[in-house]
Amino acid sequence: MRDTLDSRLAARVAELRVARGWSLDDLAGRTGVSRSTLSRLERAEISPTASLLGRLCAAYGWTMSRLLAEVEAGAEPPALVRAADQRVWRDEASGFTRRSVSPPHAGLRGELIEGVLEPGADIAYDAPPVAGMEQHVWVLDGRLEFTDDGTPHTLDAGDCLRLRLLGSTRLRNPGTGPVRYAIFVALP
C-alpha cells in the first residue's frame, strides 16, 4: 500500500476502532455505515467522503481536523502556517474542498477552516463530532444554505452564523458558482 493520505487515514481509522475494542459490526452500528464499506475504507480500497468522515468522527468524538491532522506527517504544528503548507483535502464525490488554515493542536480549543463547495454540492452530517462544539460560519464568496438541526439559514457573502452544534447539519451550495466560506471551530 502506498503511503498516501488515504492509506494513512485508513490505517488510523482502523487503529481507532481496534483501540476501542470495537468490531466492524460495532462501528457500523454506531455510524450507520455498512460493515463492507468500513472494511473497504480500512483497507484503503475507497476514499472516504466528507459525510463518511463526519460519521466516523462523531462515533469517535473527534473533529475532522483532528483526524486529518493525525494522519499528516510532523508532530508539533508551527505557530505560523504559510498558505502553501496548509493541508487541503478534497472530496471529489461531493464537490467539497477543505483547507485547514490553522491546524488543530491538543493544547488549543479552536481552529480555522476554509471550505469550498462547488455548485450543487450538498453535504449532510448526522451528528456533530463533539456535541456542543461552537462554530462561526462566515461566507466569503457566494451563497451557502446551512441547516442546523432542521433550522435552515441562507448566508450570503459577508454573513456570519454562530451556533453550537447539537444535532444534524447540512451545507449546500444552491448557486451556479462555488461558495467559499470560513469556519471557526471552538471545542466546548
Image: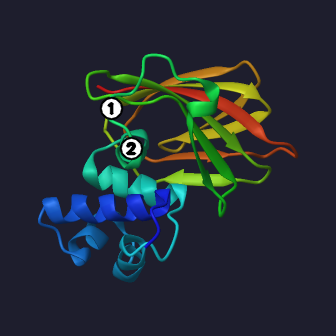
Residue 182: % across, % down: 61, 27
- Please report the residue visible at 43 percent of the width from the left and 65 percent of the height from the top: 7
Quarter of image, res 49: bottom right
Give the left or right position of residue 144, taking residue 185 as reference.
Answer: right
**Residue at the spot x=59%, y=23% of the render?**
82
Label drawn at residue 96: none
* Outermost residue, right side: 176
Judged from this view, the residue extending furthest toward the bottom is 36
Above or below residue 92? Residue 133 is: above
- Which element carries disc 2, helix, strand or loop? loop
Residue 81 in percent (x, y) is at 52, 23
Q: In the image, what residue type sits under mark 2?
A: Pro
Provide the residue designation for mark 2.
Answer: 128
Seen from the viewer's position, the closer of residues 150 and 173 is 173
Tell me which residue sits at (49%, 17%) in the image: 80
Which residue: 75% across, 38% down? Answer: 179
Q: Could you tell me residue 51's position as x and y percent? A: 50, 57
Q: Whole-percent x and y of residue 98? A: 59, 42
Badge 1 vs badge 2, beta-carbon distance below 8 Å: yes
* Quadrant where the image shows the C terminus: top left
Residue 160 seen: yes
User: What amino acid type should be assigned to the residue bearing mark 1?
Assistant: Gly
3D distance between C-alphas at marks 1 and 2: 8 Å
**In the figure, residue 22 lies in which quadrant?**
bottom left
Position of residue 151 relative to residue 83, above or below, is below
> Would you say residue 126 is visible in this rendering?
no
Q: Quadrant of the N terminus?
A: bottom left
Q: Is residue 17 left or right of residue 119?
A: left
**Foreground: 23 or 12?**
12
Query: Dot 1 corresponds to which residue?
Result: 132
